[in-house]
Amino acid sequence: MNLKPAGVVQVPAMSAALSPAARPLLAGPLLLTLIWLVVEGCTLPAAGAAAPENWPRFRGPNGSGVSATASFPTHFGPGTNMLWQLTLPEGHSSPCIWGDHLFLTGFDGAELLTIAIDRRDGRELWRRGVAPAEIERGSRNGNPASSTPVTDGRRVHVYFGSFGLVCYELDGDELWRRPLPPPITQHGASTSPVLADNRIILAVDQDVGSHLLAVDAATGEDLWRIDRPGYRRGFSTPIVWPQERPTHLILPGTLRLNGYSITDGEETWVVRGLPNEMVSSPVFAEGMFFVAGWTPGSGVPSMPPFDQLLEQGDRDADGALTMVEAPNGPARRHFVYVDADKDGRIDREEWLTMSEIFDSSRNALLAVRPGGTGDVTDSHVAWSFADGLPYVPSPLCHRGRLYLVRNGGIATCLDARTGKVHYQEERLDAIGDYYSSPIAAGDQVLMISQPGTAVVLRASDSLEVLARNRLGEKVMATPAVIGQTLYVRGEQTLWAFAPEK
């Protein structure tokens, strides 16, 4: 472990200071709050005062990426406003924070790891591993530890595509595990579990057998499973709505955005108009859902007739195409995608299904009003936008503005209520792909490129770059903010940055 604290007082782990009989009390939200206040040297807040902020899932509160009360240093990096840094096993999951606990996942080549860290000084509190029977198929940029944990301050839940769901108490005791088959995709899993109404809900969009799964958060027992026929591989993490007392799960997928009942998984409404493959996750703000999707070649018919392909390549005349038989062009380029059942052959039904999906695919940002039943495309889409769209990063809505960033370091800012352009496809001068989603705190917006340049923008109607911070390490994960501390996970390092006192 490479731990380099910078001016931090070492504090023993609270769980170590308690008797074994008392440790389960750590699961109580009230005691967690008391422990946090004592450690921070604070007094109890007066009635009506805000509780300590948490970042309990991917992109923080309900996936918004916004810290309502926080700020973070404009200038940061190794050696600059660095509170501490910690070397970790590789992984792409983002920080999940409750009180003084920060949770991440990693992969050490043998085990899939859940790691708990004291967020104040970077000390590792515990790590637990599970051994997968096999590692899921993934892309060159993929990692088996890509999904972000979710917590409610009592338990922490993690998902590994190569294993399934695992639940731990905050002190690391395993409560339950729910093994699941690896998802059938070309890139591996990256969706993260969400927590609502004592349910852990997992979106499993894959090349065949897409579905939603809900299990009891306390026991791991199945509550419901809803198939999603017609949906192919997807990598989005759902959000819940309304945030205070959720009744619906909001999830984009192949060609559309859906609302599902949290109680039983029943589909309530659908909006059409998205691309064939969704990676970016939705957000809710300003009274609307915002979802953005982009894939290469979307909206351009490019799939030739299947009979034409058979004439060109079906050497054994069996009415299907192997990879060797597939002619150059869409059949060869999209072979793994089209071959839904992964039997090494493309048959007529698989080809026709994907041809219809590709022909209907549209790159778009949609602003959708909640409510309605059935197909509400014509009645509930407030506005849409088709330029500067991200492939992986999710939209960010902050102070009435919607921010987008796409590969190459190209940023766009729109009025969230109307779609009016504030600035469009302007360069951040931080080239490279973008996998990390933007976040915001106070009057600053943060976007981080895969090569590791963290660009800080002023939250305003015009593009104003406040800093370009070089981290010197690849970044795929989305950062988190608590108070004035920014937590950034690189390829091998977790950093905590805070203003110098």
Image (tube, rainbow, N blue to C red):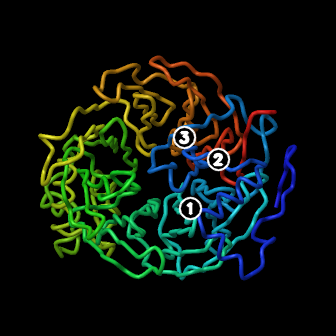
Task: For label 3, count other residues whose C-alpha is less than 10 Å away and answer few (under 14), some (14-19) or many (20+).
Answer: many
Q: Which quarter of the image is occupied by the N terminus? A: bottom right
Q: Quadrant of residue 248?
A: bottom left
Q: Position of residue 224 (x, y in %)?
A: 30, 76
Whole-angstrom CA distance, mark 1 to mark 2, is 42 Å
The front one of 295 and 310 is 295
Which-is-in-front pick, marks 3 and 1?
Answer: 3
Q: Is residue 359 visible?
A: no
Which-is-in-front pick, marks 1 and 2?
Answer: 2
Q: Position of residue 106 (x, y in %)?
A: 63, 64
Task: For label 2, count other residues whose C-alpha is less than 10 Å away and answer few (under 14), some (14-19) or many (20+).
Answer: few
Q: Which residue is mark 3?
A: 67
Q: Which residue is mark 2?
A: 45
Which structural element holds mark 2?
loop
Q: Position of residue 50 (x, y in %)?
A: 57, 44
Q: Quadrant of residue 171?
A: bottom right
